[in-house]
Amino acid sequence: MAVLLTAVLTLSLSVVITVTSTKEAAASCSANRFNGTWRSSDERLKRIDVWQGEDCHLYAKAWSVCENDSSHICSWGTRRMGDSPEPNFQFVGYNWNNANEVLHLRMKDRSHISVWDSTDYHNGKKVSFTVTMYKSR
């Protein structure tokens, strides 16, 4: 009887321990200084939103001035950021129908990042530029 009671208690305890909500799991992730909204005055890269997902990885959504309406900004879509061993560096890649683009984010201080945008077009053309962004929230 004692063995059965011990087995039941052990099983119920393991169920309680393994059942955690995704919010609790995300809360256990270590905070990242890149989290937040970053903005620039450069129309090629107006904004980057960075947040920590439920899987503890960083995600990003970049924005630029819309091609057909310069009064609005358009999202490039959400992408998981690359895993970087260096705490002051992150990167995110976008694959377009005519090019591959990578944004390299480097922390300058708590409120500024430097973003190097490197685009390799399928026709062989390469374009890169650097933008300084400030944290708006």
Image: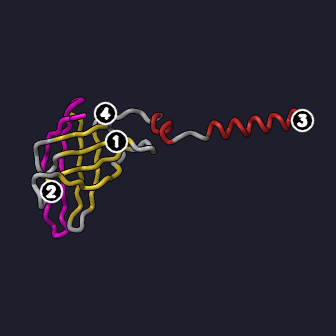
What residue is pinned by disc 3? 1
Instruction: For marks 2 and 3, give the CA distance.
Output: 71 Å
Give the mark nearest the N terminus, 1 or 3: 3
Residue 100 at x, y = what percent?
24, 61
Residue at disc 3, secondary structure: loop
Looking at this view, is 52 or 121 the one in front? 52
Mark 4 vs mark 2: in front? 2
Q: Earlier in the sequence, mark 4 or mark 2?
A: 4
Q: What label sits on residue 51 in the rendered view?
A: 1
Residue wearing tag 2:
66
Q: Dot 1: what SS?
A: strand
Rendered image quadrant of residue 86: top left
Write down the residue under mark 4.
33
Q: Is residue 103 magenta?
A: no
Q: In which quarter of the image is the C terminus?
A: top left
Residues drawn in magenta = 109-137
